Amino acid sequence: MITLTDIAYVRSGVSDLDGAVDFATKIVGLTPVPTDEPGVAHFRADERSRCLTFVQGPSGVIATGLRVGGHDELADAETQLEKRGISVTRGDAAGAASRGVGAFIGFNDPWGNRVELVSGQHVTAELLAPGRNAGITEYGHSCLDAPDVVEAGRFWTTVFSAKVSDWVGEMACLLRVDPMHHKLAIFHGEGPALCHINFQVASYDDLFRNWHFLVDNDVEIIQGPGRHPTSGSAFVYFRGPENLTYEYAVGTRMITDDNAWVPRVFDPALPSSIDMWRGPITPTTRQRQL
Ligand SMILES: [Fe+2]
């Protein structure tokens, strides 16, 4: 079993780099990271040296990065995946530098989502300088699509160390790799895709201020303000350029005692399983896997 210690980043292809950068900076409120890489833009939300990277080119998600313990653990993960017949690519030095990591490997999950395992993700003591003060405190989670959510849950909890926190029937599997209720989630979708990327904000005031800001700036609200009965977090989902769905959330449940937590199965037929405030449930826009 491969032990995941955290999420690392999302790497996303964009046809309009300036438009994607503008939105991430001025609307979402991420911190741009200086780089001399041509056609590439990095963003921070917390101590990670980057958590979202745009690469000029075809529009779609390139990879979702997840952390393992260190270089030895990464080498062990490579061996374990290959033993299972999963083809693994070892990242080169330039790729590692672009990702802000010591080393990385890439593989496709059984449903075609490109995943990168990283060791030595750089953190930085540089102050955050967000383009707008949205109250973001951290890169919270990423959600991937799979046509068989139950099998995907099995994959991430047997090949990897993720634990199921809750199910929404066979529509969503919410997985934790640390006390946060979920840092990785699998949603039902026909093909490999990034369902959304989440940023935690500091307070309910931030969430609602952000909601008004988005409405005032003609940003398409996909869902919310609402509250997930699973994680307990209040949320707003909104649509960015290149079909990238962003989420702000606050109040996410922490599961500190793994042995005491029994995953629940919420009825997927009930809208309140997604939003207990009973707001409209609109499917999020997916960013397809390249
Ligand atoms: Fe989410």
Image: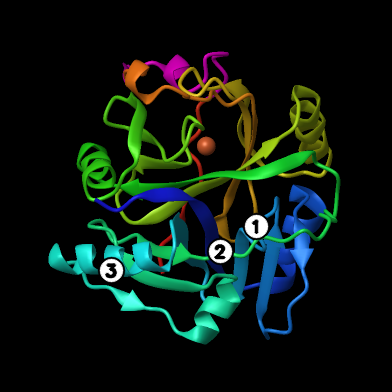
Q: Which residue is drawn at 73% across and 65% down?
A: 21
The three-letter amino acid code for the residue at tag 2 is: Gln
Residue 253 appears in the rendering:
yes
Question: Is 32 situated above or below 146?
Answer: below
Mark 2 and mark 3 residues within 8 Å of each other at the beta carbon: no
Question: Is 98 situated above or below 239?
Answer: below
Q: Residue at x 52, y 73 (%)?
A: 102
Mark earlier in primary sequence (2, 3): 3
Mark earlier in primary sequence (1, 3): 1
Q: Is mark 1 on a helix, strand or loop?
A: loop
Residue under label 1, please give it: 48
Quarter of the image for residue 136 reads top right
Task: Choose between 196 and 104: the one closer to the eye.
Answer: 104
How many marks the image carries: the answer is 3
The three-letter amino acid code for the residue at tag 1 is: Arg
Mark 1 and mark 3 residues within 8 Å of each other at the beta carbon: no
Mark 1 and mark 2 residues within 8 Å of each other at the beta carbon: yes
Task: Choose between 97 and 38: the one closer to the eye.
Answer: 97
Residue under label 3, please give it: 78
Q: How far apart are labels 2 and 3 at the CA level?
A: 17 Å
> In what quadrant of the picture does the C terminus appear?
bottom left
Whether residue 57 sits left or right of residue 46 in the image: it is left
Residue under label 2, please give it: 121
